[in-house]
Structure formats: C-alpha cells, structure tokens
Image (cartoon, grey):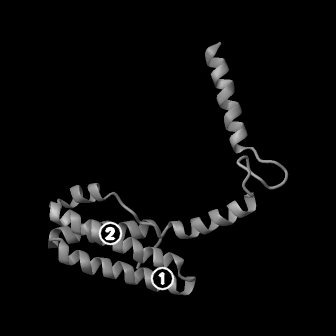
Amino acid sequence: MKRLYLTVVALLSMTMTFAGDKNGMDAAGANTAATSATMAKADSTASYDISYNLRRLGETLGLTLDQMNSVEALNRIFRGDLKTAVEADKANRKALMDSAVEKDMKYMSYVLTPEQFDKYQTLINTTLANRGLEK
C-alpha cells in the first residue's frame, strides 16, 4: 500500500512538473515562448562549450603539478575566448573560434611535452569534430 501511495505521489508530481496551462505558461509560471527562444539560442551555441574535466585531462596526459596549474590557467583563457566567439555575430563566430583554438594550441605547445601535446591535439580535434566545429 505504501508503495502504491508513493508511486501515485511521484506520478502526480511528474505530471504537474511537465504540465502547462493554456496561456503559454509552464508549470513554474515562466512564459514558454521566451523559454523556447532562450533554449533555441542555447542549442545554437551549446556546441561551442567544450569544457572538459581538467583532472581527467591531467591523468590522460600525465601532467605534473606545475603543468596542471598552467593548463588550468590556459583553460580559463580558452573558455573566455570561446565565450567571446559565441557572443559574436554568426559572420565572425567561425573566425573567432579558429583563432581561439590556434591560440590555445600555441600556448599549450609551450607547456606540454611533444608527446603530451600530440595527445592533447588529438583530444581537442576529436572534441571539435564531435561538436561539429572542425577547423
């Protein structure tokens, strides 16, 4: 009986969460038209977010602590450059994206050993290809 009650409560909660009213408002009271526009913009720029787990990157590349600190700082710069590319108009977005990637590769080549850099290049190129942002 307890399971049945909890199942009904969960079902009703999920129904209320996904339900919307006739006036274009979702269950939380937000205008669905505005939400849809925001989601469309997020979808168009979501592929430009190529954040990655720095700890896993460090393990994969075999980074030292000093290299890890440098890579973390360079990642912040890279993400800032990508944010600038995303906020630019469509005509300039590709050029800014390419510039950001080239700048990141140049800086990483100073920090990483040749073997680490080759692995990093493979990872970044694969990530860009998977997101449809190939150079």
Q: Where, by quadrant of the figure, is residue 98 drawn? A: bottom left
Residue 47: percent from left, percent from top: 49, 67
- The local secondary structure at tag 2 comes to helix
Sequence-first tag of 2 and 1? 2
Residue 3: percent from left, percent from top: 61, 18
As drawn, is 62 to the left or to the right of 32?
left
Tell me the residue at 74%/51% (across/down): 29
Q: Residue furthest top?
A: 1
Q: Residue furthest front?
A: 29
As drawn, is 60 to the left or to the right of 135?
left
Determine which of the numbered discs, if any, sits on residue 62 in the image: none
**Quick one: quadrant of the N terminus?**
top right
Viewer-nearest residue: 75 or 113? 75
Tell me the residue at 52%/66% (across/down): 46
Q: Residues within 10 Å of mark 1 (few under 14, many from 20)?
A: some
Task: Reply above or below: 7 against 63.
Answer: above
Tell me the residue at 73%/46% (across/down): 27
As drawn, is 102 to the left or to the right of 83?
left
Residue 68: percent from left, percent from top: 21, 63
Determine which of the numbered discs, if any, sits on residue 94 in the image: 1
For the image shown, how many numbered marks are present on the structure?
2
Task: Reply above or below: 12 against 101.
Answer: above
Q: Residues within 10 Å of mark 2 (few under 14, many from 20)?
A: some
Amino acid carrying label 1: it is Lys
Residue 15: percent from left, percent from top: 71, 37
User: What is the CA distance from the residue labelled 2 to the residue labelled 1?
Assistant: 19 Å
Amino acid carrying label 2: it is Asn
Discs 2/1, front: 2
Tell me the residue at 57%/83% (across/down): 89
Determine which of the numbered discs, if any, sits on residue 75 in the image: 2
